[in-house]
Image (cartoon, helix red, strand yellow):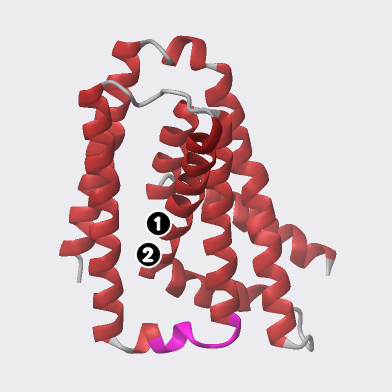
Amino acid sequence: MFSTLAAFLGACLLIAASPGPSTVLIIRQSLRSRRAGFLTVLGNETGVFVWGVVAALGLTALLAASQLAYDVLRIVGAVVLVWFGVQAIRAARRGDGGRELVGDATRESGWRSYRGGLLLNLANPKAAVFALSFLPQFVPAGAPQLPAMVGLAALWAVFEIGYYGLYVWFVGRLRRILDRAAVRRRIEFVSGGVLVALGVRMALQG
């Protein structure tokens, strides 16, 4: 069991270290505030856990087997990525990418951050299919598959909360430098462009 968990956590580290749309969004939101960045992480990891549970129930096999279902989710995911990218570019043009909010606006912004991380993950069909192929490899021999995969999905999500939490902390430490208006606008433009490019690539992939 120990060797299996060690291998699983090592694989989780490699997955988290691979840059992707979630990483871009987490860094962008962390520039607004640590709270926004961490809530984006929580939203993203909720999506990771959801896909893990869905994989444990065998439902993602239907997605992997149905080209139509996969393509529909792929196009939705592409639209979501492009939308996030356009939002970042618009924020850069307005110059409000790093403003802090107070009161009800802060609560609304926090919910938006969490929802954004969740939506970005759930709209990614690759995340669903990957969970289906990834988790069963680490189920111990003789263990009941459903509870074991749900437990692994929870461990995966918790591990990534800790990993991406370091991103949030590190960006927060650099905010004094990154919070300059010109620097912030450039980062918003770059992150927005990357998200749009990733969305277009997802839309064009078969």
Q: Secondary structure at mark 1?
A: helix
Split into 4 quadrants, where in the image is the N terminus? bottom right
What residue lies at 28% left-to-right and 52% top-to-bottom?
81
Q: Residues within 10 Å of mark 1 (few under 14, many from 20)?
A: many
Helix or strand or loop: what does disc 2 sit on?
loop
Q: Is residue 167 visible?
A: no
Q: Is residue 57 magenta?
A: yes
Q: Is residue 23 above or below residue 44?
A: above
Residue type marked 2 = Asn
Examine the image and state in which quarter residue 19 appears.
top left
- Residue 38 occupies quadrant: top right
Quadrant position of residue 73: bottom left
Q: Residue at x 46, y 54 (%)?
A: 115
Please say if the residues under marks 2 and 1 sit with CB atoms less than 8 Å apart. yes
Q: Which mark is residue 124?
A: 2
Image coordinates for residue 59, horizontal then vertical, percent: 49, 87
Which numbered marker is on residue 79? none
Does 16 sit above or below residue 206? above
Figure label count: 2
- Inter-mark Cα distance, 2 to 1: 7 Å
Question: Magenta residues, as a range?
Answer: 56-62
Magenta stretch contains residue 98 = no
- What is the three-letter code of the residue carrying label 1? Leu
Query: Can you tell which of label 2 and label 1 is closer to the viewer?
Result: 1
- Residue 65 against residue 134 in the figure, above or below: below
Quarter of the rendering occupied by the C terminus = bottom left
Q: Is residue 202 visible?
A: yes
Mark carried by residue 120: 1
Would residue 45 be found to the left or right of residue 67 on screen? right
Which is nearer the eye, 58 or 117?
A: 117
Q: Residue at x 69, y 69 (%)?
A: 152
Local crowd size for mark 2, using a 10 Å CA cut-off: few (<14), some (14–19), many (≥20): many
